Every structure is written in C-alpha cells, then in structure tokens.
Amino acid sequence: MDNIAIIIPSRLNAERLPNKPLKLIKNKEMILHVLDAAKDSDVGQVIVATPDQEILELIEKHDGQAVLTSNKHETGTDRVYEVFKKKLNSKPEIIINFQGDMPNLNPNVIKNLAKHMKKNLCDIGTLASRIENKHEEKDFNVVKVLTENSIENKSFAKAINFFRSSNEPLNKYTYHHVGIYAFTNKALIRYVSLKRSKLEVERKLEQMRALEDKMKIDVGYIDSCPLSVDTEADLKAIKKIMEN
C-alpha cells in the first residue's frame, strides 16, 4: 500500500522489564519477531525508532531499517513522530505505531487495520479482542476498551473509553485492547501538539489524550489477543506460546 509507514518504538529502559526488546524467544530477540511481523504485513515501509544504539545495530544487522531518536521522549508516540517528521519528512498518509513488545501479532491484522484507515473514517484506528475470563477483567495490565457497538462481526466501532480497572460490571461492548495504533497524517500531527491529558497521566494510557480532545478512534476486532510483554511473567507466557 502506498504512503503507509509502520514505525516501531523500542527502548531498553523499560521500568517493569529492562532490556525487554533483546529478550530471546525461539533464539531470536523479541524486537526481531516484531520487525518480521511488520514486514510480513506488506503494507508499507517499516522503521524501528529507538534511542538505543544496541537496538539500532541489531535491526540493521538483520536487514531492517532503524533510526536513532532522542532519549527524552515521554511516550512511544512522540518517538514515532520524530521519525515521521525527520526521516519521512511528514509524507506518509497513514502511520502505524506498532508496539515493540507484541511478538506474536498476526501480520494479517496489520493489513486489515491499514485497509480500514484507507477509508478515511476516523482519526485513529486500533484493535481489540474478546475478554476471555474473570482474571483478564480484573487484571490491571489488561487495557480495556469500551466501544459504541459490537465489533465481533469483524466490523469497526467507535471507541468510547479506555481503562485498566473498573468498580462496575463490564459493559457487553468492552474488549481487550491491543496496543497498535494507526494515525492519519493530520491526526498524528494534531495528537503530538496536544499536552498530555489528565486521564492519560492518571491511567497511563496515551489514547486518552486523543479521546479527551474529541478525536475519533475506531476499534476493529481480532480473533485472538496477542500477548503484550510487560513483565517477566508475560515473557514466560509468550515463550510457552511461541516455542511450542
């Protein structure tokens, strides 16, 4: 697809799991699994955005493209924007922020997200899956998204809210959010111009900045939730899935 860029923000200094991108899964660094998934989606140029020379060299050694970014960014989206502006000269019409800690994401869902964004129906597109059990409902690390309508018929629906926990029973249109974001060119420029919002800081969820500024986020459904690796326990779980 023309004029689409996938930018993967990745850094070594993660609070909960330091050196996360370099953790080995099937004898290959996690960031390389993510890079391969992005490339296999075949939707556009793929670039890793990192403040770390070690990640840059690893990506380039494996025939990938990486850009060394500032180490002062507050969010991954800020890191994505630096590459979009300085490396890509703000030219891509659609920019996909693919988190560097989802090594088992199916490349086809990236393709489907890109197709939806080409319809120009929203500012930001993202994905979600079914919440499988009570543990996920209560798990603070599982981000939930509430949508306007059901998305399980493979359609997209408008996001109403994102949260980590709730004292109330979950609405039937609440799903397990998957951390991948597709921005239109204008939406990304607008987003990074905004100050970090109150709920963004409180919930540690970047997408709240967009919702609080009345940006439209569409959510699409995927059948299985790729595991986001945030902790040592997550790493063990993803290894069990991918190595078996």
Image (spheres, rainbow, N blue to C red):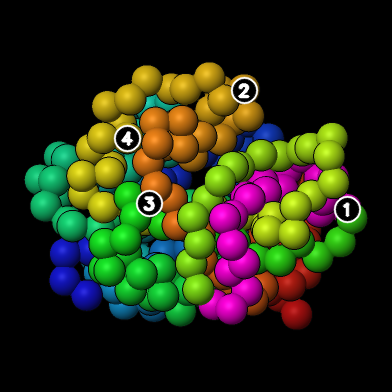
**In this rendering, would 74 be left or right of 136?**
left
* First reached walking from the N terminus: tag 3 or tag 4: 3
* First reached walking from the N terminus: tag 4 or tag 1: 1
Tag 1 residue: 135
Residue 202, numbered circle: 2
Q: Which residues are magenta?
A: 135-154
* First reached walking from the N terminus: tag 1 or tag 2: 1
**In this rendering, would 84 be left or right of 71?**
left
Whole-percent x and y of residue 71? 37, 27
Mark 4 secondary-structure assignment: helix
Residue 124, numbered circle: 3
Residue located 21% across and 49% down the image: 185
Q: Are marks 3 and 4 in contact (CB under 8 Å)?
A: yes
Q: Amino acid at mark 1?
A: His
Mark 3 secondary-structure assignment: strand
User: What whole-number distance in Å separates the C-alpha atoms at marks 3 and 2?
Assistant: 21 Å
Residue located 34% across and 55% down the image: 122
